[in-house]
């Protein structure tokens, strides 16, 4: 995996550097050294083994924002040393790189991306909320995406614009649990859209063709041809109607075994103010009824974003959607040191386990954050149902993350983090469990560029299978310095 990671890092550096050779870049770099003590290092149910971990993580973060170039690069390798358990020693890579460039003004654009992070192999492997505590439960994942965009205006764009986006990608995973070497999958997402121009302000319309391949070797994927027509009642109210046709190849099939058919959807959008917006949709596709919701509200002290959607996905497409390195908070403010937040290497357990199959995904998301004075709190709530096409692994996950932090003095701050995960499987050999974790953190700023942190926490899993239960108590001390 080191060669793959090196290739990804090199490509990410090149794509961001090529974005604008003469551009002004802003960023930072630093180093984190952390010592961890655990009373159940491998998260075992019956053979608890105490041990320690030493983690050394240098990181670099850079960004460039301009009228024709938007780019960011964040990379942090994490070297893990387990004294007395050398078989667990490894280097984990976390990478998030994006570049969006306007190469020919108004006509030709290029979007590039590279991600690397840890992905869950299988919840049956005793897994916590991150890959540091039990690396055997996770796999290293790396992906690249290349998306050129061609825009051709009709009547100077006043009538319509033709947009063509041939998207190419590739996913690598290296199975750290030695379960077959991971997967190497090519993907593509090609779109052609005709979007109405300002001549149709009252009745905007579009024609959309999309062909998405989850695996370019097997040609497994879905295709859509649809027309969307809207009616703008006022700046606050808008109605959209979509009519089209879906066709799947080696992808998720409906209850009657069909993988193609007509589709329709109607969506109502309400925008009461510039700070708030809501949309509600209902429709039908070959696999059944579909529902859609999106809402957002922003205040100077409180912000929330929520959505619900039904879609056909695979493990590769869901991993591509993951935000590996968060660079902005929910208020839209930039995070100066994205690797210094303490949870960057925590995998998003909302992603699918690595099963070579497509699935129907229903997902509800609620993200909220509150900030006032020295207090700050956040909520992240995910409810995800996956119905697999062939694999007997229909799953339901309810996942919540609550955090609260308070600035105690000019140098000292404290925070509490609660994680909750309920997992169930709808099959004869289903594996159900409830998992929770609580962490208490203190952070002391030693100087303008350095800090010292301490964390204590407890992780617990209760499963219907008693041999899958486990608990862990963990304490850590870390030192951070920015260069």
Image (tube, grey):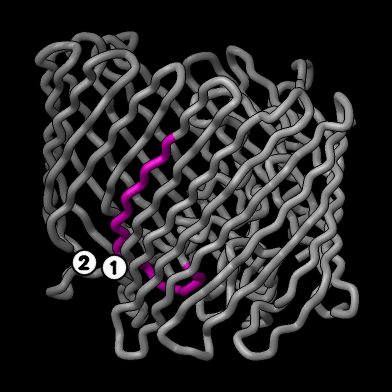
Dot 2: element: loop
The residue at the point 48 percent across, 44 percent down is: 167
Q: Is residue 18 visible?
A: no
Identify the residue under disc 2.
Answer: 259
Q: Quadrant of the C terminus?
A: top right
Identify the residue under disc 1.
Answer: 252
Between 216 and 79, the one nearer to me in the picture: 79
Q: Is residue 93 visible?
A: yes
Q: Is residue 389 above or below residue 324?
A: below
Q: Name the magenta segment's main secondary structure.
A: strand
Observer-side mark, 2 or 1, equals 1
Tell me, yes or no, whether the highlighted magenta stretch contains residue 364. yes
Q: In the image, is 391 to the left or to the right of 116?
A: left
Q: How many marks?
A: 2
Q: Is residue 478 above or below residue 191?
A: below
Dot 1: element: loop
Q: Is residue 111 above or below residue 475?
A: above
Q: Position of residue 47 (x, y in %)?
A: 69, 89
Q: Earlier in the sequence, mark 2 or mark 1?
A: 1
Q: Position of residue 331 (x, y in %)?
A: 49, 25
Q: Position of residue 348 (x, y in %)?
A: 53, 55
Q: Is residue 412 above or below residue 345?
A: above
In the image, the segment drawn in magenta is 353-368
The residue at the point 65 percent across, 60 percent down is: 457
Label 1 crowd (10 A; few <14 / some 14-19 / many >=20): many
Rendered image quadrant of residue 235: top left
Q: Position of residue 130 (x, y in %)?
A: 63, 61
The residue at the point 18 percent across, 20 percent down is: 204
Rendered image quadrant of residue 228: top left
Between 334 and 318, the one nearer to me in the picture: 334
Real-space Cα distance between discs 2 and 1? Answer: 7 Å
Callout 2–callout 1 Cβ contact below 8 Å: yes
């Amino acid at each position: 995996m080191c060669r793959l990671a090196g290739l990804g890092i090199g490509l990410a550096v090149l794509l961001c550097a090529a974005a604008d050779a003469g551009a002004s870049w802003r960023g930072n770099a630093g180093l984190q050294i952390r010592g961890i003590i655990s009373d159940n290092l491998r998260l075992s149910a019956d053979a608890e083994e105490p041990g320690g971990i030493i983690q050394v993580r240098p990181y670099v973060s850079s960004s460039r924002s301009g009228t024709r170039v938007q780019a960011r690069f964040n990379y942090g390798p994490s070297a893990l040393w387990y004294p007395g358990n050398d078989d667990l020693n490894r280097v984990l890579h976390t990478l998030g790189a994006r570049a969006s460039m306007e190469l020919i003004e108004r006509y030709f654009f290029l979007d590039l991306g590279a991600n690397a992070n840890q992905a869950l192999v299988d919840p049956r492997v005793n897994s916590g909320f991150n890959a540091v505590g039990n690396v055997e439960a996770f796999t290293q994942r790396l992906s690249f995406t290349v998306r050129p965009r061609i825009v051709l205006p009709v009547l100077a764009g006043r009538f319509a614009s033709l947009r063509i986006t041939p998207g190419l990608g590739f996913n690598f995973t290296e199975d750290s649990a030695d379960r077959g070497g991971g997967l190497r999958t090519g993907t593509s997402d090609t779109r052609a859209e005709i979007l109405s121009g300002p001549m149709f302000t009252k009745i905007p319309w579009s024609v959309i063709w999309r062909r998405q391949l989850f695996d370019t070797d097997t040609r497994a994927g879905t295709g859509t041809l649809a027309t969307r027509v809207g009616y703008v009642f006022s700046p606050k109210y808008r109605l959209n109607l979509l009519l089209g046709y879906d066709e799947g190849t080696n992808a998720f099939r409906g209850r009657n075994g069909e993988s193609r058919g007509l589709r329709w959807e109607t969506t109502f959008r309400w925008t009461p103010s510039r700070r708030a917006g809501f949309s509600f949709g209902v429709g039908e596709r070959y696999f059944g009824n579909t529902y859609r919701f999106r809402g957002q509200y922003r205040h100077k002290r409180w912000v929330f974003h929520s959505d619900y959607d039904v879609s056909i996905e695979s493990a590769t497409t869901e991993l591509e959607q993951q935000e590996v390195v968060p660079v902005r908070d929910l208020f839209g403010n930039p995070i100066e040191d994205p690797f210094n937040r303490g949870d960057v290497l925590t995998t998003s357990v909302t992603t699918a386990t690595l099963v070579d199959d497509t699935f129907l995904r229903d997902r509800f998301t609620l993200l909220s954050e509150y900030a006032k004075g020295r207090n700050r709190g956040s909520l992240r709530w995910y409810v995800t149902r996956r119905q697999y096409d062939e694999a007997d692994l229909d799953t339901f996950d309810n996942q919540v993350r609550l955090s609260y932090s308070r600035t105690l003095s000019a140098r000292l701050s404290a925070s509490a983090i609660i994680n909750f995960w309920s997992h169930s499987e709808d099959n004869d050999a289903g594996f159900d469990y409830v998992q929770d974790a609580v962490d208490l953190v203190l952070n002391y700023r030693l100087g303008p560029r350095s800090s010292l942190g301490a964390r204590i926490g407890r992780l617990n899993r209760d499963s219907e299978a008693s041999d899958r239960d486990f608990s862990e108590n963990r304490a850590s001390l870390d030192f951070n310095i920015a260069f």
